[in-house]
Amino acid sequence: MRWGLLAAAAFVLAGCNSNHVDVARPTTDRDRTLLAQAPQVEMDYWRMPQRVAYRTTERPGTIIVETSTRHLYFVEEAGTAIRYQVAVGNEAFGWTGTATIQRKAEWPSWTPPAEMRRRWPHVPAFMEGGPRNPMGARALYLYQNGRDTLYRIHGTNSPMEIGEAVSSGCIRMHNEQVMDLYNRVPVGARVIVR
């Protein structure tokens, strides 16, 4: 009995030391309605955003995507970062480089690039934003030298693929988590994908 109480107390205290980052809940009726219609997946402990120690010379506010581990880091002050699990481009379509977020959009529409439509003719030429759109709840548009790279950090309508290398190069996030990142990151933020 005594050991059981000690084990229970240790478990409760361990929960108090969690590095989980609470993701803000949607505040608009539109967000709540569209998220309720979007595909959902059960979130386990390891898929939740975490505040972690992260050593880098990059300034706070920088986004660093580590494609090998399928994590996106939002650099904070004092040697920490918020780590999100993401889906990345598969080996044939992966993109790496440095870019700037030049535009942000809520529930963005989607116009697939011509080369994607040649590879996959079933892909529509255009899709309005919404819960079935592959861009999900938010999109951060990546530019290099003022030119659109055609790569994005965005939500997804396939949350079960988070943690995989499956996209055509874009960085996909759970819708609630991309909404959180969207609120933290200003236009002009630096993005490093490696």
Image (spheres, helix red, strand yellow):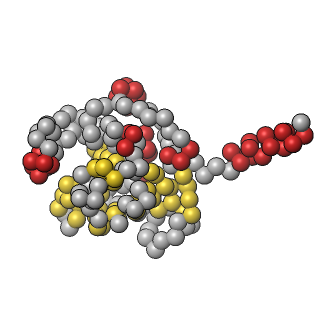
Q: Quadrant of the N terminus?
A: top right
What residue lies at 53% left-to-right and 48% top-to-bottom? 46
**Can you see residue 28?**
no
Q: Nearer the viewer, residue 192 or 160?
A: 160
- Please name the residue shown 68% across and 45% down the image: 15
Q: Position of residue 30 (x, y in %)?
A: 35, 28
Q: Is residue 171 above or below residue 4?
A: below
Residue found farthest to the right: 2
Coordinates of residue 98 in the picture (x, y in percent): 30, 67
Q: Is residue 37 left or right of residue 146?
A: right
Tell me residue 13's x, y (percent).
Answer: 75, 46
Residue closer to the observer: 24 or 112: 112
Determine if residue 68 is in view. yes
Q: Residue at x 49, y 55 (%)?
A: 83
Say left or right for 25 vs 146.
right
Identify the image quadrant of the C terminus. bottom left
Placement of 189 over or under 134, stated as above or below: below
How far from the left and from the top, in percent, is residue 101? Answer: 29, 57
Marker count (numbered): 0
Which picture quadrant has residue 73?
A: bottom left
Location of residue 158 by image quarter? top left
Vertical relation: 41 (above or below) 164: above
